[in-house]
Amino acid sequence: MLSLTCKTAIKAVIYLATKMESGEKAGIREIATFINASEHTVGKMLQTLVKEDVINSMKGPNGGFFITAKQKNQSLLKIIHAIDGTEIFQECGLGLSKCSATHPCPIHNDYKVVRDGFKHMCLQKKVSDLLEPVNDGLAYLMG
Amino acid sequence: MLSLTCKTAIKAVIYLATKMESGEKAGIREIATFINASEHTVGKMLQTLVKEDVINSMKGPNGGFFITAKQKNQSLLKIIHAIDGTEIFQECGLGLSKCSATHPCPIHNDYKVVRDGFKHMCLQKKVSDLLEPVNDGLAYLMG
DNA sequence: ATAATAAAAGTATTTAAATACTTTTATGTC
DNA sequence: GACATAAAAGTATTTAAATACTTTTATTAT
């Protein structure tokens, strides 16, 4: 459902959130190492997140990426929309291009329930919620 | 979540189910046309379904693909396992390779609920269930 | 038996996503 | 103001999935 890049983005944002309290900024290399992803992929993806106001960046020495308190309260959905766009929660389960209530595929209603459930979950979960178990050593961003 | 090929497979099986009552077999071209997919892709995919006993085939004149009454009562999950394998319902929501209850990603539990819901739906839905709305003109395999 | 039909099987190409690389621009520090 | 640092931006390559093509094999009707 989510692209690989999008999953990487979510992990990167959570990592930045763990840095927020101390006010530290994180560089591309540091982030890539911590979430076990390619530096290049992470660099490109972070650019998009900055453009979409999901995170912030500063150039130059002592620069890096960081998030604000406000951004820490963003939902997962915000990150997903920034990377994968808004269409992914409308996709047909069987790949029809015009699947709708009036022209449904055979699993339209059942798939909608699952898809909407996932969307609801992404809307409800804030970055701060996901950060907690990581800070407590109860959840991981790699491995 | 499902590959394109897998979605095509589900549509093809449903189409074959609509042919079952009359005892007709369907050729690759006919199936591809009806579900609006490439002939080549459909041919390759049908081979896999035959090998996995999801459908049957007969070579030669008057040959083609068909399903039995028993196969009509197969679940969606059977088709999915034949094409995409059994791993897809264990994938981590954030792409960790070893995401589990003891080493979870930050969304492990919530994603599991969604994923299991989808799996449950695929297990419960039989080909015969999906066939009905298509036969009644209430659902479509293309468009 | 032979010819025609249709699936099976194997190979090759295309496409899109992911990943890698290079150059440019901005911002501190000395 | 020159230099070092780090992100931004643009381009290129790689990879895997999907699609296309070709040859082979099995079956049935004549």
Image: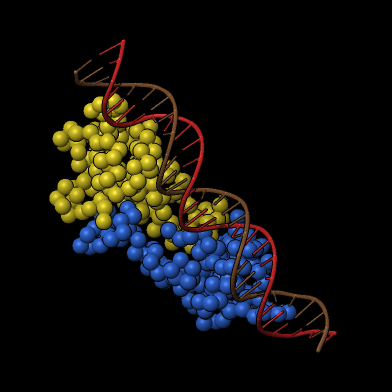
Chain colours: A blue, B yellow, C red, D brown
Q: Nearer the viewer, residue C28 or B37?
A: B37
A58, above or below A38, in the image:
below
Q: Is residue A87 left or right of residue A100?
A: right
Which residue is nearer to you in this view: B91 or C20?
C20
Residue A5 on image: x %, y %:
53, 62
Please name whichever residue, B99 or B73, is drawn nearer the observer in this view of the structure: B73
Residue B45: x, y in percent? 37, 40
Q: Considering only vertical position in the picture, is B10 above or below A71?
A: above
Q: Name the quarter where the C terminus of chain A is drawn.
A: bottom right
- Please state which of residues A124 and B25 is positioned toward the viewer in this rendering: B25
- Identify the image quadrant of the N terminus of chain A: bottom left
Question: Can the viewer see residue B83 in this picture?
Answer: yes
Q: Is residue A69 left or right of residue A114?
A: right
Residue drawn where x is 73% and y is 79% of the image: A61
Q: Which residue is found at the position 43% from the left and 68% from the top?
A: A85
The number of callouts visible is 0
**Which quadrant of the structure image shows residue A34?**
bottom right
Percent from the top left, x then y, of residue D19?
40, 47
Q: Residue at x 28, y 61 (%)?
A: A98
Q: Residue at x 66, y 73 (%)?
A: A26
Residue A135 in sight here: no
Residue B18 vs B104, above or below: the answer is: above
Q: Quadrant of residue B59?
A: top left
In percent of width and height, residue A131 lies at: 55, 70
* In-image side of A40 versus B20 (left or right): right
